[in-house]
Image (cartoon, helix red, strand yellow):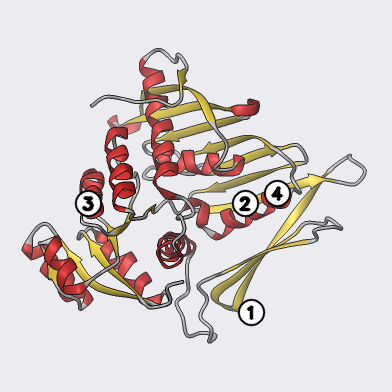
């Protein structure tokens, strides 16, 4: 097992490079930011000066002079797949932002290039790694809820994010077989418009996934609802909320079978009045598994000497450390490019079904262009 510090370069100069990835790399254990790369000399130099590391526009030179093992690709939305493939072809283990690529053919080229060069690719799909989502997945894995029959994304995330949230409750190993979709545009006040996307996904064994999104879901108070749900043989879970303020309602069946038994979720902090999040604890009311606990894996060993760690930072840090651990231990990342490709594949299939009047589209699915 490799135990040395892991050297990481940031590939790209998008905003997340300085406000998200660089701080996380300072906080995470045994990793070092050693360089940055940008398309233009000016943007690369400015980022390098801000972060205190050398800047390059030549990726081969960056590799020779700073010897990173991992590249974190953070570029403009449309360039993600192109630059990700370039980093993989340069022989770096790569963390890609979402989506892994916009077209499935581009995703396939990235996956094939990584396999042929024996490098690892992780994708920064952080939603299922956020603390509350991670705790819910732990609860499902205990078997307390039994088999999850159906799963819903009701505006909890867009596109591949929303599909990933929906799939996570069924298990990322659940095999999707068919998709139908509807995409429509509607007028809004003040001359604006929205595009709604709705999809139904059939999985092997008769399980179902439902996906709903609107393109103004992040930007307009007209669409304030945020929810994800799962329905299982022994209970259910539902997230309800307004904007970013959500509440979890997780229930099992009471012993007499006449009422829901609510699971109480407790947040633990470094101090009674705040500090960093230390743990989430689910009090289930079940005599065999009374407590299910999620612990913050990034908490500072010395109380009060680390960052506050908001939920999204924990999620993205989990993506980074999934790749770091895979490189150190010669294992696979915990999510990976094939899962990310499937999330994007389902989104494209929903849109293709809508284009064909809602006719179901069988998976696997490919789209030219």
Please say whether residue 283 is visible from this viewpoint: yes
Q: Which residue is mark 4?
A: 250
SS for dot 3? helix
Q: Position of residue 97 (x, y in %)?
A: 33, 52
Answer with mark 1 or mark 4, whichever residue precedes in sequence: 4
Q: Which residue is mark 1?
A: 272
Q: Answer left or right for 117 relative to 171.
A: left
* Residue 111: x %, y % from top left: 33, 44
Residue ID at (39%, 46%): 337
- 333 relative to 260 in the view: left or right: left
Residue 186 falls in image quadrant: top left
Front tag of 2 and 3: 3
Counting residues from the start of the chain, the first of labels 4 and 2 encountered is 2
The quadrant of the image that shows the C terminus is top left
Query: For the residues marked 1 and 2, what is the alpha-carbon distance in whole angstroms?
Result: 27 Å
Q: Which residue is mark 2?
A: 137
Indicate the secondary structure of the residue bearing disc 4. strand
Of residues 126 and 267, the one drawn nearer to the viewer in this rendering: 126
Q: Which of the numbered marks, if any, corresponds to residue 89?
A: 3
User: Which of label 1 and label 2 is nearer to you?
Assistant: 2
| Mark 2 crowdedness (10 Å alpha carbons): few <14, some 14-19, many ≥20 | some
> How crowded is the residue under tag 3: few (<14 C-alpha within 10 Å), some, or many (20+)?
some
Q: Quadrant of residue 148?
A: top right
Q: Earlier in the sequence, mark 2 or mark 3?
A: 3
Instruction: For marks 3 and 4, give the one nearer the viewer.
Output: 3
Residue drawn at x 44%, y 65% as measured from the top left: 321
**Pointer 1 local density, CA inside 10 Å: few below 14, some 14–19, many at least 20:** few
| Residue 159 showing in the rendered view | no
């Amino acid at each position: 097992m490799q135990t040395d510090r892991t050297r990481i370069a940031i590939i790209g100069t998008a905003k997340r490079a300085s406000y998200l990835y660089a701080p996380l790399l300072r906080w995470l254990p045994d990793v070092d930011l050693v360089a940055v790369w940008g398309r233009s000399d000016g943007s690369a130099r400015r980022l390098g000066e801000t972060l205190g590391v050398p800047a390059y526009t030549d990726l081969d030179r960056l590799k020779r002079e700073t010897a990173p093992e991992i590249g974190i690709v953070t570029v403009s939305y449309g360039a993600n797949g192109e630059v990700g493939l370039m980093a993989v072809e340069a022989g770096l283990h790569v963390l890609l932002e979402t989506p892994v690529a916009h077209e499935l053919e581009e995703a396939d080229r990235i996956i094939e290039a990584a396999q042929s060069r024996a490098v690892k690719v992780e994708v920064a799909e952080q939603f299922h790694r956020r603390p509350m989502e991670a705790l819910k997945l732990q609860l499902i894995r205990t078997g307390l809820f039994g088999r999850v029959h159906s799963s819903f994304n009701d505006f909890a995330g867009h596109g591949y994010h929303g599909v990933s949230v929906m799939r996570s409750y069924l298990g990322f190993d659940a095999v999707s077989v068919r998709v139908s979709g509807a995409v429509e545009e509607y007028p809004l006040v003040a001359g604006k418009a929205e595009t709604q996307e709705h999809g139904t996904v059939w999985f092997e064994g008769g399980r179902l996934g439902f996906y709903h999104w609107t393109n103004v879901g992040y930007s307009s108070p007209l669409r304030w609802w945020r929810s994800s749900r799962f329905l299982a043989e022994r209970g259910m879970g539902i997230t309800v909320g307004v904007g970013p303020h959500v509440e979890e309602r997780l229930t099992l069946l009471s012993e007499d079978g006449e009422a829901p038994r609510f699971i109480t979720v407790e947040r633990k902090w470094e101090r009674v009045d705040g500090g960093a999040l230390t743990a989430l604890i689910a009090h289930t009311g079940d005599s065999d598994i009374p407590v299910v606990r999620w612990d913050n894996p990034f908490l500072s060993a010395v109380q009060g000497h680390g960052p506050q760690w908001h939920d999204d930072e924990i999620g993205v840090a989990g993506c980074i450390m999934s790749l770091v651990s895979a490189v150190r231990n010669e294992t696979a990342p915990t999510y990976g490019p094939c899962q990310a490709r499937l999330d994007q594949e389902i989104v494209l299939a929903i849109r293709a079904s809508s284009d064909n009047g809602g006719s179901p589209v069988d998976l696997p699915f490919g789209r030219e262009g």
